[in-house]
Amino acid sequence: MLLKLKHSLITLSLFAAPIWAANDWFLEQTSLTNAHKFLLEGHLEESFDSMIQAWQQEPQEHMKGHLDQLLLKALDKDCGRSFDHSKLPTWLNKLAIQRQVIQSPGRLSYRLEIDAQTDRELDQILFVQWPEQVLMSNVEAPEKIDDKYWQYRQKVDLNAQLDTGLYKVKIKTKEGEDWESWVLLTHTTSKQTVRWSSKESWVVDKTALLNRYCPLPVMDVALYGDVDGDYAEVWNKQYESDYPSQVPETNLPIDRYLLGVSITHKRWQGAITIEDKQIISKAFDISE
């Protein structure tokens, strides 16, 4: 009887200890503990706001890793749609922030691209790594895509991949309107990558299960040719499934081209699209 009583007490203590420990831990009330608490309660926007506050306090390296993993976990809920319920301004139709890794023979390079679709002409697209490292600050001539919208596609080459952490994007129109938002990036976690398997073919490596709430990775196959002395895209095709492993029939003339194959993973931060794009490229000959 005594043995049975001891066993019951031990069992009760095992169930009670984690609950007491969790409650005691959350009494600390830091930005990090709040981010954990809100995530466990399913309050994604409040959790995301707490993560931003934690990054603003310039955490130490081990805390950065903790925050990175916390953001990745939060993405499992709805791929980031609920991180921010505020909408883009009425004059900004779409906004995408894309990190690129470009692998060409003997070279590895990195790029930041910001795409903005707007019904106003823009004066500035500013992208800053917290607290004050300016990564992009200009705008180039846009493309008029229809009677209403301009498409701005700003690119800047980087010395290294954009790391996990806190950033800010700010967009200003020529009419004096402006809008800004915090942006949180995780470390690059592409679950499908592409590599060359032979001279003219490639293969997709699947390294982890995809998030079922996120769009399927998109493969883009493009050929670039000499147009008036500069390389320009002359053929392109996108695939969301049934990825090819070779260039299909293109009906392009016999010539040497630059072949680019890419995989793009997409998620959201509220109304903002966050993308990670891996590109491999090499010379490609079309012959008889």
Image (tube, rainbow, N blue to C red):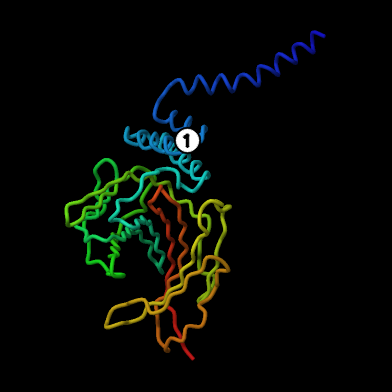
Q: Residue placed at 40% from the left, 47% from the top?
A: 270
Q: Residue placed at 27% from the left, 50% from the top?
A: 127
Judging depth in this view, the residue of 42 and 229 nearest the camera is: 42
Quarter-of-image position of residue 16: top right
Judging depth in this view, the residue of 171 and 98 nearest the camera is: 171
Seen as rendered, the residue at the extreme top is 2
Apparent side of residue 81 relative to residue 212 in the rendered image (left or right): left
Question: Within 10 angstroms of label 1, few (less than 14), some, or many (20 or more) residues?
Answer: some
Quarter-of-image position of residue 266: bottom left
Judging depth in this view, the residue of 135 and 144 nearest the camera is: 144
Pinpoint residue 24: horizontal percent, then vertical percent. 50, 19
Which residue bears the numbered disc 1? Answer: 43
Amino acid type assigned to the residue bearing label 1 in the image:
His
Task: Indicate whether 260 appears above or below 72.
Answer: below
Apparent side of residue 16 relative to residue 226 in the rendered image (left or right): right
Apparent side of residue 2 relative to residue 160 in the rendered image (left or right): right
Q: Residue placed at 51% from the left, 41% from the top?
A: 73
Seen as rendered, the residue at the extreme left is 175
